[in-house]
Image (cartoon, rainbow, N blue to C red):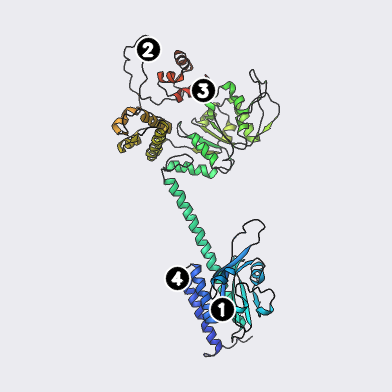
Amino acid sequence: MTALPPPPAPHSPAADWHRQELLLMREVMRLIGRSLAPGLVLREMLHLMSELLGLNRGRVVLVDGEPASAGAPRTASIQHAYGLTQAEVARGRYAWGEGITGRVLATGQPVIVQDIDAEPLFLARAVQRRDLPPETVAFLALPIEVNNVPIGVLACHRIRSRQRHLNDDLAVLRVLATLVGQLLQLEALVADQTRQLEARNAVLANALNTKSARYGLIGSSPPLLQALGELERVSQTQATVLLLGQSGTGKELFARAVHLASGRRDRPFIKVNCSAIPETLFESELFGHEKGAFTGASAARPGWFEQADTGTIFLDEIGELPLALQSKLLRTLQEGTLVRLGGQREVKVNVRLVAATHRDLAADVETGRFRQDLYYRLNVIPIRLPSLAERREDIRALALHFVSRANQAHQRNVNLAPDALARLEQHPWPGNIRELGNVIERLVLLAHGTLVTAEALERFLPTATAPAPAPPPPSAPGERPAAPLVRDYQPAQSHSIQALEAALAEHQGNQTRAAQAMGLTLRQFSYRLRKAGLR
């Protein structure tokens, strides 16, 4: 059994050096306990190395990060030092593998230079030889590692004539280099956690800031934020998104948000309202046609899917798609190819589909109005859009947004009083955001003053259930009674094709007057014309 060496005598030089080492370690650990800032700890550590152990001109060299350009050499520079002037610190910059310091960085192995005058690799770059003592000077350089990867060098000068073993100095420096690596790793972890927290706080602040809109969507209610969160989680995938919800809940804005949040944001975004396309034109509009495919097809025309190639296509009211075309749409989605009407060759398309409907597609599948296989293909990522009744805390922000937009569009200066905003929050809004926007636009155009109170607002609000109409006053022959100031919300199927044709004929094709006569806005009237195939 090998006998252990006897402990040093209490007053021997070895015992003195041992006490100095313990003092150094104790002070360094005390500094780390007080502060994790590397600048303070490392400079004092280098100071104690010089004062207690005679390891002079200590420096901590750290990598400068990634190279500025591909192929450029990596470099490291002195970040912390003691006993060096500012000019000497500035000169302490080394490429990978350059000199003693660069070799330690490249190999991850310590280097001991017994005599710097006899070592051709020693650069004497930071401290010139003439500024060092005339006797023999040694140079010790040890790697600083994080996860077994060299990220820097702990180095110092040493006078060889000192009455202290070199191995003792190396043992202390190894411990200090390990501490430096752990301190720098801890600093990086804290910085990373801080960045993550700051990023998360920024996201929450943006979500809760009702004055700003994410993708044009106003509000901070939990149902809206939940829908937005689901949208952003799937936006980077290629999966089909099906937007569900009542009419007027902002499906087009959500579809555009899916596009903007995806990698296709710089590619085309094509929106198609399936309820506004006559059944006879569906195939030509969606998939295009070749020249001569039908009467009037004087030239070939790419359809909406081809125009959306590499981008996103939004099929609104997909529940209105004719049953005969549903199989062709399914094939395009599954195979990424289409055949134009009247064509023979397949055309490859790369399109992300976002569909929307207010219908119950599952019920339509049960009744045979919608293909089951297409329903399953569309229902990959269903996102339900909340109604305005579920987002009452967003009504105030939405109303202020619509007022600002209408004021700018019509060069008005109308504002809502607090009691008017409270009244808007109480209204049921069966037409959701679209109805709210229409009411605000009428209010801005027709309000008598610049500040609208709750009392003045009442005449613009549609009633939930319309009262029985009073008998119209006598009118001259051929004269039609004026449309009411406030138009109740009406579904898209509120007027027959015959009524629309009669209104157009009575007003010689003037859609604005025909719409007013029927109690509709021009937008509502035009939508019904497109759906009926009259436009």
**Of callouts 3 and 1, which one flags the residue occurring earlier in the amino acid sequence?**
1
- Marks 2/1: CA–CA distance: 105 Å
Q: Which residue is mark 2?
A: 479
**Of callouts 3 and 4, which one flags the residue occurring earlier in the amino acid sequence?**
4
Residue 8 in view (yes/no): no
Q: So how many labels did they put on this image?
A: 4
Give neighbour class at mark 3: few <14, some 14-19, many 20+ (Cα, 10 Å): some
SS assignment at label 3: helix
Looking at the image, which is closer to me, 104 or 89?
89
Q: Is residue 310 left or right of residue 217?
A: right
Q: Which mark is residue 34?
A: 4
Quarter of image, res 476: top left
Q: Position of residue 442 (x, y in %)?
A: 38, 28
SS assignment at label 2: loop
- Marks 3/4: CA–CA distance: 74 Å
Q: Is residue 177 left or right of residue 490?
A: right
SS assignment at label 4: helix
Looking at the image, which is closer to me, 71 or 23?
71
Q: Which residue is mark 3?
A: 530
Q: Which residue is mark 1?
A: 56
Amino acid found under the numbered disc labelled 1: Asn
Amino acid found under the numbered disc labelled 3: Arg
Give neighbour class at mark 2: few <14, some 14-19, many 20+ (Cα, 10 Å): few
SS assignment at label 1: strand
**Of callouts 4 and 1, which one flags the residue occurring earlier in the amino acid sequence?**
4
